[in-house]
Structure formats: structure tokens, C-alpha cells
Amino acid sequence: MATSDFKALATIWNHANLTQYWKHRVFHTCIASKLLYGLQTAWLTKSQRNKLDGFQARCLRKIIRAAPSYWSRISNARVLAPLDAYPLSFQLLEQQLLLFGKIYRRPDTDVTRKLVFNPSSDTLRISSVTRRRGRPCLNWCQEVHKHAVLLSREALDIGLQMISEKSWKRSVRQYCRRPS
């Protein structure tokens, strides 16, 4: 759907009087928001996140009129730099961490908090389901919690940081918008 929407807006991407900044704003508003809608509750594998970032890079190459990476040898980071953008996978991680903090701040009686955290405690709920053979499935709670630990640098500081919504947002933005 996002590809068809991007192609439908071809007149905007080819318009000479619009700056790259405005074209990027249109892309982010119309395409990226539709692409990321509802994904904050799903954990994507590394290959899925790479596909998301690849789609963004292909679209932004079209916006800034750069040749495909195979011909031009321009990296995706150099495509994002003039637009002051960061990868969609980082934007998705930012949304997931903000949602994780929002769930943490809910009262103990809330259903979503009961699904993620143990009652009257700040520890994650571990499922008691027996695993099948093979690689373990990625669990949203555990994967986002890993990033929250990396964000706060200590597992003990997570709860203190998530209590204040403003400080949590600020630290999440700094973590997700760091230079990679």
C-alpha cells in the first residue's frame, strides 16, 4: 500500500518548485505514518527492519533525485543526511519505547500492564509456555525491555526514568536519534 501511495504522489516528487524539505515532510506525513501505523505493538526481525529502511531509502532517493545505490554507490546514510532524517526502524523503536513507558505508568489494575508486567512489581511477566524446537520467537516485551535497559544503562534505573513522562521521552529521543 505504501508503494502504491508513493507512486500516486509522483507529481509531488517531480515538482520543481517544492524543496526537498517539503517533499520529505509530505513523505513522512503521508507514506511513513501509514507504513508505521500499528507496528509499535509488533516486534520486527532484523531483516524486516532492513526492508523497512530500504524502502525509505529508495523513496528518499527518488525525492532527492539520486540514482539507485547500485549505480551511484551513495550509502543510505548519505541519502538521509541532507534531509536530516533517521531510519524508519529507529522511528519505530522510538514509538515502541514510548508505548512501553506508557504501559509502565498505568495502574496495576490495568489489563495491558498485567500482560506486560507482574502485578505490584516492575518485573516483566515471563510466559510459562513450553517452547517448540528451534530458534525462540521474538517477544515484544522482552525485546523492548532490552532496549530500555540499554537506554537507562542499568536495569534498576528503568522504573525511575519511566515514571516521569517528560524525562522518558527525552531519553528515548536521544537514544533513538543517536548517530549510528
Image (spheres, rainbow, N blue to C red):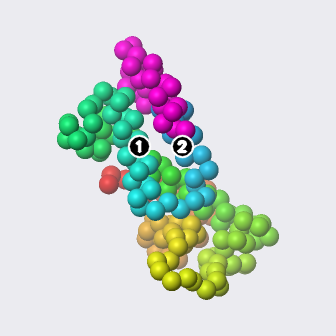
Question: Would residue 140 be counted in the magenta stretch?
Answer: no
Q: Residue at the far front: name it.
A: 133
In the rendered image, residue 43, in percent from the top left (x then y), is placed at 53, 62
- Check disc 1 and report the residue beneath it: 55
Quick check: can you spot residue 157? Answer: no
Tag 2 residue: 35
Q: Which is nearer the eye, 119 or 58?
A: 58
**Who is closer to the viewer here, 9 or 110?**
9
Camera sees residue 36: yes
**Residue appearing at x 33%, y 52% in the figure:** 179
On screen, residue 75 versus residue 12, left or right, reads left
Q: Residue at x 53, y 73 (%)?
A: 137
Name which residue type carries label 2: Leu
Query: Are the residues tagged 1 and 2 within 8 Å (C-beta)?
Result: yes
> In this rendering, would 154 be left or right of 117?
left
Residue 155 is marked as none
